[in-house]
Amino acid sequence: METQGASACGPLAGIRVVDMTTVGMGPYATQILGDMGAEVFKIESPAGDVLRYTEPVRHAGMSACFLNLNRNKSFLVLDIRREEDLVRLKSLIADADVFVSNVRPASLRRYGLDYESLRPGNPRLIYCGAYGYSESGPYAGLPAFDDIIQAKSGMAHFQGANDDQGPRYVNTILVDKVVGLTAAYAIPMALYERERSGLGQAIEVPMFETMVSFLAVEHLAGKTFVSGDGSSGYPRVMSRHRKPYATKDGHIALMPYTTEQWMRFFIVAGRRDLAQESKYVDAAARNANIDELYAVVAGILGGKSTAEWLDLLAGADIPHSVVLAFDALLDDPHIQATGTLFEYDHPTQGRLRAAGIPTRFSRTPGGIRSWASELPKHEG
């Protein structure tokens, strides 16, 4: 998938983006835009994006995370505390289709980089601010990072609520990526509307509200019904038995979902008696007893080896999977066939591995035209 130097392609070809974001959330969004053909100008301070210096790193200033979030971008160092650099940045924004920032709004206002200040010079500008909390609430302006929002949104609570170990963070920068994806879909929506109105607009993508909405899909649960006395938390995913099941010699993921799948599982498991129990046959009753059912499944799966279960479950067309460490995906035949993970020669970092573009467009596919580069020297 080495396409460095190729001309821009994809559904966003011709769109110019000024990217003043750092760490994970904003760069993830702008890399997606770049993958889809947008011309992205990444603005860094003379110190550089802090993510450049996280571990692991082969060469200083070029961490693995930075490499994985900043392809398909042109890099420019500007110190907006210097008048000439601020003027240059505003000139870039005046000619851009999109400006994306994860700087707190109060700081941007001090430099005239808020939407109201920039709009007169570019009425067609799509202005996207992605930061901790909406400006319309009392938390406006508070600092926020992934762990903080995992804790404040309820994510850490739910992650640790099915055992006695207490709240826990998800072992990925989930908030950064969810909010980055949200910004990445909101911006093209605004560009689409601009085709009809001819006007730009401001988009606010706050981390806190985005994650509360994200979790509310299933975890609002009983609190959905205002007049009731139900609790939050989706019962199925909150079961303490919802985890990969231990077999005789390893672990396996198993997910019968429909009544038909559950009945087939009971049969191949040699437990036809369970297929006769109303609390497992009826979908509503099964959901009400899901924690008990998962405990039953855990007891059943311990009786055979992983290989035996894989054979039985495949023959019965029941959703299942082996449990893989991420390293194993490097040799996974499907991942290799789809180019989801691939190797390339970076101009300065040597042979590297990266994730490809997961979305496929039949007529206007995205592409990788350039890789993340070293921090340019500041001219000043």
Image (tube, rainbow, N blue to C red):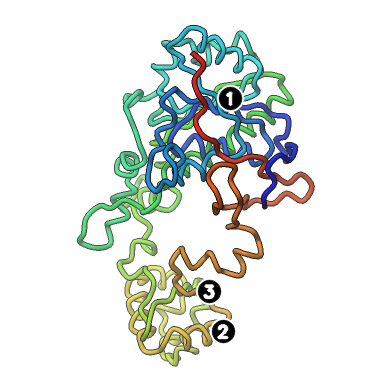
Where residue 316 is drawn, which disc sits there?
Answer: 2
The residue pinned by badge 1 equals: 18
Q: Position of residue 184 (x, y in %)?
A: 57, 37
In 3D space, how far apart are the residues under numbered discs 2 and 3 (Cα atoms)? Answer: 9 Å
- SS of the residue at dot 3? loop
Disc 2 secondary structure class: loop
For residue 67, above or below residue 158: above
Distance CA(mark 3)–CA(mark 1) = 44 Å
The amino acid on which the numbered mark 3 sits, given as a three-letter code, is Pro
Residue at x 48% of width, y 29% of height: 21
In the picture shown, does residue 180 fall above or below 167? above
Question: What residue sits 73% from the left and 46% below the top?
Answer: 365
Closer to us: 263 or 12: 12
Q: Amino acid at mark 2?
A: Ala
Which residue is painted at 69% across and 37% down in the image? 37
- Numbered disc in front, either 3 or 1: 1
- Rendering coords of residue 63 (x, y %): 44, 43
Q: How many marks?
A: 3
Mark 1 residue element = strand
Query: Residue 314 got which mark?
Result: none
CA gap, disc 1 and disc 2: 52 Å
- Contact, mark 1 vs mark 2 (Cβ under 8 Å): no
Residue at the right extreme? 363
| Badge 1 amino acid | Val
**Horizontally, is 277 left or right of 19 in the view?**
left
213 left or right of 348 in image: left
Q: Mark number for residue 319?
A: 3
Category of crowding for the residue at label 2, using alpha-carbon neighbours closer than 10 angstroms: few (below 14), some (14–19), many (at least 20): few
